[in-house]
Amino acid sequence: MTDLVNEIRAQGFWLPDWLASTVIFAAVVALALFIHRLAFRLLTRIVAERDLFWRSLVSRLERVARLAILTAALSFAATVSPLTEYQASTLRHILLIAFIILVAAMARTAKHIWMTVYLRRFKLDAEDNLLARKHVTQSRIIERIADLLIVMVAIASCLMTFDAVKQYGVSLLASAGVAGIVVGLALQPVLKNLFAGIQLAITQPIRIDDALLVEGEWGNVEEITSTYVVVKIWDWRRLILPLSYFIENPFQNWTRESASLIGNVMLYLDYSVPVPVIRRKVEEILAASKLWDKRVVNVAVTDFKESVMEIRILASASNSGRTFDLRCEIREKLIDFIQQDYPHALPHVRAVMDGGNGVPRRQAAE
């Protein structure tokens, strides 16, 4: 390497220092970019016929590799260029910052690759996806927190390369009383959500794709970031809530332990309708339905009203969406059945004239 450096300097002795440095830096950077582009074009062709993981991996590594090869190229150019002491010192500082950024980028890329490989085993579109949702939620929360920590450490490391910032940091640590309180108050929302994210990753009161009833709205957890949760409402609206909300406030999680749910349908019929007939019809409807998971079916009279009896029908399905559709199917087919076989049993009212004075009175039909 020493012989190569001396040879390059000997060949360009007749050029002014500034011009020689410019030529060397331009040539080295151009060569580095050419090598990078050639290498990744070749890699892209190699993985073109492979699965999505390998194509994504090459795409993810491209920017990191470009930064790495440029940093190495600039370091080599700084070694062989006739720079002044000030120029060399400034360039070393720039390269140090570039190296810190490179390490942070490599850490994020390694984290992303590890998460991708780990999560390939779990399928969110599976029928029973409880285990998959558990691992995906933990991984995504940890990934967001890791991203935040990597960026914070990288920024702090870059700032600490400046003498003024380093001296300020030391003095701040030396007198961390009032300053620490001020900084702590300023960062309270950030730290609150950061610790809430860690707690969510460990305890998992919510997971990706969980069905929630929160703030009077029903929806599914669509995304969990390092600071907030996105809940996709049934009508496609999005409800944005901070992470700390799910630690400090009560809410309903319909899929905490299992995606299966029991749905209920309420009927109000005349006392003349035989309940066993309704029970057999419900069982017939469920047996023919593709939505029923064949686990729960129950028909029971739960209350007596003044003119009707209350019949509760319970049926289970594999997830919240199928449960809702199953309830609708039961209602539609029961209404059709009752209209055809027991039309007199449907709740209705009639108006009669009271004493011929023209004043109508509503009465339940008998």
Image: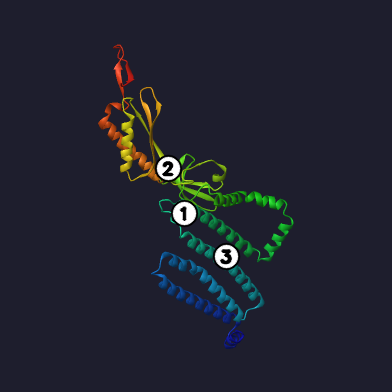
Label 2 sits on residue: 261
| Depicted 166 relative to depicted 289: above or below | below
- Residue for point 59% across, 76% down: 75
Local packing at callout 3 (Cα closer than 10 Å; few below 14, some 14-19, many 20+) is many
In front of the other: 294 or 138: 294
Q: Secondary structure at mark 2?
A: strand
Residue 104: image tag? 3
- Please identify the quadrant where the C terminus is shown: top left
1 and 3 marks in contact (CB < 8 Å): no
- Please identify the quadrant where the N terminus is shown: bottom right
- Going by the numbered disc 1, the residue's amino acid type is Ala
- Going by the numbered disc 2, the residue's amino acid type is Leu
- Residue for point 31% across, 36% down: 281
The mark closer to the camera, 3 or 2, is 2
Query: How far separated are the C-alphas under marks 1 and 3?
Result: 29 Å
State which quadrant residue 360 falls in.
top left
Label 1 sits on residue: 132
